[in-house]
Image (cartoon, rainbow, N blue to C red):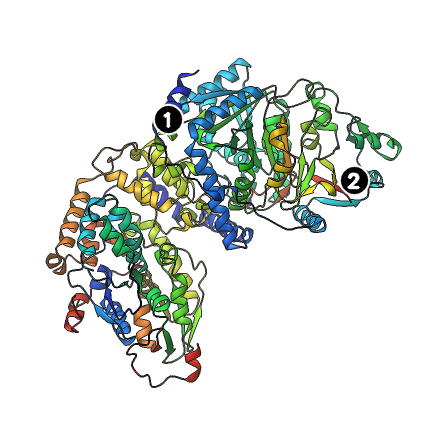
Amino acid sequence: MAKLSDFRVRVEDALANEEVRGNFRKAMDGLMSRRLDQFPDEAELERLRTQAMAIRSNSLDNLPDLLEKLETNLTKNGIQVHWAETVEEANQHVLAIMNKHNAKSMIKGKSMVSEEMGLNHFMEELGIECLESDLGEFIIQLDGEMPSHIIMPAIHKNKRQIAKLFQEKFPDIPYTEDVDELTQTARKILREKFFNAPVGLSGVNFAVAETGTLCLVENEGNGRMSTTVPPVHIAVTGIEKVVEKLSDVPPLMSILTRSATAQPITTYVNMISSPRKEGEMDGPKEVHLVLLDNGRSNIYSDPELLATLRCIRCGACINHCPVYVRVGGHSYGTVYPGPIGTVLEPQKDGLKAHGELAQASSLCGACGEVCPVRIPLPSLINRLRYEGVRQDQSSTKDSGSRRKTAEALTWKGWSFAAQHPLIYNTGASAAASFRKLMPSKMGAWTRVRTAPPIAAKTLHQQLKAKGIDNE
Amino acid sequence: MTTLLQPDSVYFYGTCLIDSVYPNAGVSAVELLQRAGIRVIYPQAQTCCGQPAWNSGYRDEAREVARKQIALFPKDIPIVVPSGSCGGMMKHHYPELFKGEPDEAMALQVAGRIYEFTEFLVDVLEIKLAGKGVKTDVAIHTSCSARREMGVADKIEQLVGQLENITVHEQHHKKECCGFGGTFAIKEPEISASMVTDKADAIRETGASVMITQDCGCMMNISGAFEYENQHHALRMPQSKHIAEFLLERSEVLCTKYDINVPETSDTTEDATHG
Amino acid sequence: MSKARNNIINRLRTTKPEPCHFSERDHLSRFNWDKEERINRFVERMVAVRAEIIHASKDDWAEKIAEICQEKRLKNMLVSPETAQGKVLYNMVDQLPDLQSYDHEIEDWKSEMFNQTDAGFTTTLGGIAETGSLILWPTKHEPRLMSLVPPVHIALLDTNQLYTTFSEVVKEQGWVDKGMPTNALLVSGPSKSADIEQTLAYGVHGPKELVVVLIS
């Protein structure tokens, strides 16, 4: 028996963990049903999805122009723009800003791009503290974990687990499983951090080219705190997050929050267009935007895979994925889990690193059905399977690297047989080939199922015997 | 696109899984079509639509198999496929597979004539059925491809809904995948096992004695789990039936939109004709 | 210009995606809501996220605010002496808690702001019925932290300024032509989180309480 891949090992562990599985199921069931309540009119939902797709497609059609326009307008507004081709470069930009201010710590609002950059790890190596202030991020940072979901990073934990974690980390505070009390504990600790932090870092949901505006949505107020209290604000985002017009924001934002957390709007929509101006009493005196490529411009070069970049990071595909709900976010071993991670990560980091994820989908289509910007996720997953085994050159990183001789031969043999009915009908039939395909793995099938029964007489034989016309 | 003014004959594409594992589903579908007055043509040279290779990334291998299949339907008549999955492959993925290829026109032509079996009965024939046999509790499992790719989830419900002696029970997480996914079940057996176990549990919990589905992939998966759990844990084992088998056993064809050669039915009630 | 910038832009320029001209981009959700309906919707949304709604008239709103302050036992409140509404409140200081003006840079009094300020009172540029949102463009007189750091935020909203959707606000208030301010905000309830087991908890980092005084 071949050694299980790291991914399969993590999956087995996750599947065996009833408590965590239960946490995910409960959370995802709630998210799915509440999302449905947000879109009572199905026809209107479809119009909104088309509209959101149109807005994002327009952004991508004009991406280089819009990025230049964004830079021009941000600069005019006094926001400093930094470009990074790689995560290393992005981290260096942040570091340079930190050093300029002699800053030894930062307070962070939620940012998946900073996770992509491995920013916390990078900074901590250099003795710079990065404190997560989003409640979920704060919790997992305490436990030394990665987010298990892009919107709800601590969704894998239940309140009992969080209560135990707080007890362990803050022994002076009495043990409680009361969510309000746990929240207030975090509030107290983080208020002090906001108060003292020399730098605040955040992500960006949409960057508006027309006005040079950074839009952030959030519920807790930590995003506003991180972008208002410290004297320096650094925003990090992917180059695809730009939209052309301010009027693009309301419809996009509306479908984002409804798809993500089933809210008609988040508590705060924070639109930042400049640092503190003369005479203003608060707000950072410096605002920086780091624009990260990290493989995005390469994804951009493929007309089909380009759709990946439409993503607005709502997480609806994750919430609706029957695989994710069982294996959880950590099994993926990537920054972005679930269907969008399955599509994005292998393109970003290469098929060698994450190409296996493309297999971890039954292609059921639940993700594509709910995507607010109509990314054809199942088609893209299928495409990446092809990229993994294709033999000619392509722009996808590590294309062809997952091709295995034995498997390729099996498919060649299957293809030959299926092109020749005489051969096919004498034993190379479906179930037979299903078994032959992976003889050693039939065991996995029969661990929870009986083996498929092979019929005594095929349909071909039976219909022929019945005299059904051949043409 | 065919005009379908008088679909007095159709091609039947049996699918490889039905061919070797569930031929009775195919025979039943053919018989049901015949009872509705349709002449059925079954090209004996058919093998597989190519989906297993397509979904595994082996597009060239899939295309060569598909190329043989699209040559099997020269007449401009509907092609009926008793599977949402294979139907979806032929209707939606053949055009992608042959994009820019010499046979593109033929692939598009074939794709435009593909009908999933229940879709054909409901949308084209507008078939009217009457139930027969004892009262039965059933659960319907619609495949993801029938639901999302072909958009025909309502057809099987509509057909079963016509049978007055059948009570349909809804399982929880009804729209969730059963975990088959073709090669997914083999490549990611642990996840697939977890999915099918949950699906089998949900259906069993409804108390239904029969599970009906329009896709034999799901059926092989779920019924395999039923049987395993019956053998190893003595859990109740609902029967599994492809919709064609079920309708053939449990209904009479009353009429279709065209009403061509529909045989006389004996034991139907007045009311059923209005169902 | 940085090397990274040029490389990225150049790479993007070598691809020209097929332009897709979707007319749907300008689709607008249309609701024919009259003023009463807009008020009802706004209130319904706000209450659903645990904001308090106080109905008032143009004559008695200040008294209502005094009542709220008493009820909440506020010891002090940030109020701008420069806005028309602030002036009204400063004219009735005997009925109100200690009114404080946010008239110096935050660095000079951060500790008082964080540790000793009970409430902030702000005006708004209007509200949005569909989502139950307040529109705030903080100014030097009503700075950004006024509606964020104190545990209670009291906001004044004129129902004549109640719009149907956010799209409508951007268009009708002419945000693009006017030019965006340093910070524009939509506030839809008190601060909250569902990060612990999907259970809502209020007052995470921002105000624990949001009181909207609606002037009809």
Question: In terms of sequence position, does the residue under pointer 2 or pointer 1 come before the other?
Answer: 1
Q: Which residue is mark 2?
A: C72
Q: Amino acid at mark 1?
A: Arg
Find residue A173 and report its image quarter. Answer: top right
Left or right placement of residue C162 versus residue A410 in this view: right
Left or right placement of residue C193 versus residue B245 in this view: right
Mark 2 crowdedness (10 Å alpha carbons): few <14, some 14-19, many ≥20? few
Q: Position of residue A20 (x, y in %)?
A: 46, 46
Specify the label residue C88 is tagged with.
none
Circles 2 and 1 in contact, beta carbons < 8 Å: no
Q: What is the chain letter for disc 1?
A: C
Q: Amino acid at mark 2?
A: Lys
**Quadrant assignment for the N terminus of chain A:** top left
Q: CA distance from mark 2 to mark 1?
A: 59 Å
Q: Nearer the viewer, residue C208 or B150?
A: B150
Q: Is residue C204 above or below residue A319?
A: above
Specify the label residue C13 is tagged with.
1
Q: Nearer the viewer, mark 2 or mark 1?
A: 1
Q: Nearer the viewer, residue C82 or C71?
A: C82
Element under label 2? Answer: loop
Element under label 1? Answer: helix
The residue most toward the right is C94
Q: Position of residue A195 (x, y in %)?
A: 64, 24
Residue at 39 percent across and 65 percent down: it is B155
Q: Position of residue A265 (x, y in %)?
A: 59, 42
Q: Is residue C202 visible?
A: yes
